[in-house]
Amino acid sequence: MPSTAEQLDISPEDYLAGEKLADIRHEYINGEVYAMAGAGDAHVKAALNIASLLKNHTRGSGCSTYMSDMKVKVADDEAFFYPDVMVCCEDSDKQQNYVKQHPLIIIEVLSSSTEAFDRGKKFAYYRKINSLREYVLINPKQYQVDIFRLNDKARWELFSLNDAKAIFTLESLGFECDVQDIYDDIDFTATYID
């Protein structure tokens, strides 16, 4: 978590009630609440690009694609996060308006302040979600996409893509595109402050 985050000690019920009224989003880990910072141009474009591609791919399939305003619940109210993008395919999630519990895929777009957390502790929390099959990390500053995929031996395997022409594949959805498609309209020469 970013060190500048606001930390409070509240119950999961109070957290969820407060999020419905909050002007800014917060993530929740074991009673502590962390305010979330805004995102830069490349971050937003990368998230929008992959979400749009997945939305088109899942249309009519029974799966739904969500962006950064939808929460995912980890374990028994242990943590709540706002992934940049996630895909859920279970019917029980369709009945939940504010929180999803059974994502098939979670995608995070990295920033300097959150990369270590997204790769480490957050991924450890996400691995507690039984439905999760693929976890993707996108670096918005260069062609670099890491796909963590749960294999048939219940082990997470890493597939790294560092070329614009590489094929990005989500096996759990039967989806693929060029890595370049994820980076559409992103200017790598722009100044980044994150």
Image (cartoon, grey):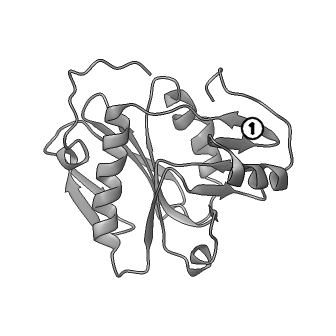
Q: Is residue 130 left or right of residue 79?
A: left
**In the image, 47: left or right of 71?**
left
- Compared with residue 140, is residue 175 higher up or lower down, i.e. above or below? below
Residue 138 on image: x %, y % = 36, 40
Find residue 190 and report its horizontal and vertical position in percent. Answer: 24, 22
**Relative horizontal placement of residue 6, taking residue 108 as reference (left or right):** right
Going by the image, does 36 lie left or right of 18?
A: left
Going by the picture, which residue comes out furthest to the left? 165
Q: Residue sitting at 37 percent across and 40 percent down?
A: 44
Q: Where residue 6 sits in the image (x, y, percent)?
A: 72, 28
Mark 1 crowdedness (10 Å alpha carbons): few <14, some 14-19, many ≥20: many
x 43%, y 34%: residue: 110
Question: Is 163 or 86 nearer to us in this picture?
Answer: 86
**On screen, residue 87 above or below 136:** below
Amino acid type, residue under disc 1 in the picture? Val
**Which of the pair 130/188 is nearer the observer?**
188
Q: Label 1, on which residue?
A: 33
Please say whether residue 30 is visible from this viewpoint.
yes
Residue 70, quarter of the rendered image: bottom right
Which structural element holds mark 1? strand
